[in-house]
Image (cartoon, grey):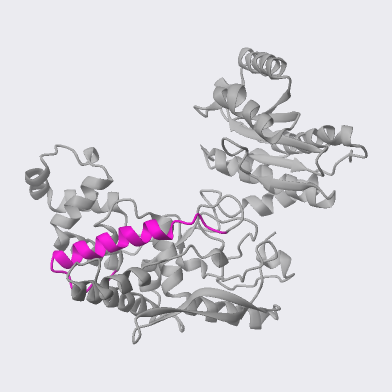
Amino acid sequence: MKFSEYFEIQPTADDWFDPVLFTDTRLFVDPFRIFVDASPGWSQAHSRLISFFNMVLKLIARSGGNPASAHWRKAERLLMFPEPPEFCLGYSDGLPMGAGSAEILRDRMMAAADAAIRLGVTSIEHFEELTLFEAQIGADRISDIVCNVLKDSFIDYTQEVAARYSIPVKLVGIRHTSWSERFERWDDATVELPQNPYTGKGVLLTPQRFLRQLPTVDPNEFWTWAWTNENEAIRGDFNYEIASNVDAKEIARFARMNPHLGHRYVKYLESNPKNPYDFRSDPAGEVGWYTAGASITKATPLAFVPQEPAEFSQFIETIIDAFVQNVENQDGWLLLWHESTPRNERIVQALFRSVVIHYCRANGIDLSGEPNAGRGPVDFKFSQGWHRRALVEVKLTSNSKYWGGLQKQTVQYLKSEEVRAAFYLSVNLADNDYLENRRSKVLEVAERVSREADKEIRVKFVDARRKPSASKL
C-alpha cells in the first residue's frame, strides 16, 4: 500500500515521493541534489551535512590515529549510521527495516576519514570525497548517511506535508533525530509523524528532486574522469593501458594517492549537476509497478475463490492465470519493457507481487515476499493457515540460474517450508526463449523433479515478448 493510499489523500503538484509502505524502493537520497537546492528549508542543509563531517575529521585528528583515544571512540559513535526504515528507501525486498550493516559502514567511514587526515585533509566541501578513499561504500550507504545526518530536516518536511493534507500523526520514537556539534553526539527523540501500519514506525517523506538511482559521486565515474583529465599520471602510477582494468580497491587506492583529484572531481560535478530520477518515464520500473499491479487486478477479476483447503493451490493458480492473461492479452507486457529494453527480473517480480497482493488482501491470504526458506530466499509464499500454503518462484528464462531454480532451489524451498505445491513462473522476453522444444523440456524436467521429490511443481509460462499493435495484426 502506498502512503497516499493508506492515508486516503490525493497528492497535488507537491514534490514529495509517495512511497510503498511495505517494502523499500530502490532509490537513494543524493547529497549533491541537496547541494544544488536553494528552496526554503533546504538551502542550508548541505552546509550542515558538511559541518557534521568536518566535526568528525577534527575528532580523528585530535585522536592522533589512536583507536584507544576518547576522541577516536567519540568519532566512531558519530559515524554509526543505522539504516533508517522511516524513509522506505534502499535495497531491502521485504519490510523496510534495513540490513543491519551500520557497524560495517562505520568501520569503512572511519578508515576513509583516517586516511584523509593522514593525507593532510582537515576539512571537506563534500563528504563523498571521503567515500572515494574506501571501496564498497555504495549508493544505499551514502543515502543512509544523508538521511541520518539531516533527519531533523526530513522530519520538519514531513510534518509540513502532514499538516497540509490533514494527515493524522502519532508520537513515535526516532533514532538519530539530531546531532549536537557542541556535545559531539547524537540525540534520539519522540516526534509526531504519520505511522507506517506495516512496521509501526514513523514515515519520513523525501522530495522527489533529491532521489536518484545512483549517487552523483561514483567511484567508477571518478576513475573515468581522472583517466580523461590525468591520463599520463595514471599510466605512470598504475601501468594500465585501458581504464576498464581497474577494480574498486584500486580506484580507492588511487584516490588516496591523489586526494587533489578527488577534490577537483567533486568541484567539476558542482558545475555539472546530474538530474534526479525521471519519475514520469520511470526507466528502471522502480516506482510504477505498484500502481500498475492495482490496475491489472481491477481489469482482471477472479472467477474463483477457495472454499476448502484442497482448493487453495487452485486459487493460487487462478491468481497466476490472471497475471498471465493480462501480460499476454491486455498489454500488461508493456510494463515489463522500457522502450525496446526489457526490465530486469526484480521488476517482473515486483509487478507480480503488486498484482497478487490485491487478490490476497481481498481473500484474507498472507503473502510473504522473499521469506527465508531454510537455505535461501523463495520469491513468494502464500498462506492461509498451516494447511493452505503454496510457493511461487518467478524466473526470467534468460536467467543463468533458471535450470538450477527449477531442479534444485524450488525443491529445497518446498522441503524447508514443508509445503506440498509450488509454481514455477517462467517469464519469456525473447523469441528464442519461447520455442516449443524448450517449453517441452521445461515441463519434462518439472515432472521428473516433482516425481523424485514427491512434491508438485507446476510450470506456468508467461509470454512477455513485445507485441505488435492491434492495428498491425
Query: In this image, 374 relative to 129: left or right?
Result: right
Specify whether residue 473 is in view. no
User: Going by the picture, which residue comes out furthest to the front?
Assistant: 68
Residue shown at 76% from the left, 48% from the top: 366
Query: In this image, 447 relative to 133: left or right?
Result: right
Give above or below for 392 relative to 452.
below
User: Going by the picture, which residue comes out furthest to the right?
Assistant: 307
Q: Position of residue 188 (x, y in %)?
A: 50, 78
Query: In this image, 417 relative to 243: left or right?
Result: right
The mark total stands at: 0
Q: Nearer the viewer, residue 423 or 335?
A: 423
Specify whether residue 112 is in view. yes
Residue shown at 48% from the left, 62% from the top: 83
Q: Report if residue 302 lies within the magenta region.
A: no
Query: In this image, 152 relative to 246: left or right?
Result: right
Q: Nearer the viewer, residue 301 or 136?
A: 136
Residue shown at 32% from the left, 74% from the top: 74
Which residue range is magenta in the image? Answer: 97-126
Q: Position of residue 113 (x, y in %)?
A: 25, 65
Q: Quadrant of residue 15?
A: bottom right
Q: Quadrant of residue 434?
A: top right
Q: Report if residue 122 lies within the magenta region.
A: yes
Q: Position of residue 215 (x, y in %)?
A: 38, 59
Q: Position of residue 393 (x, y in %)?
A: 65, 34
Give above or below for 160 relative to 139.
below
Which quarter shows the N terminus? Answer: bottom right
Residue shown at 72% from the left, 15% from the top: 451
Which quarter shows the C terminus? Answer: top right
Q: Quadrant of residue 14?
A: bottom right
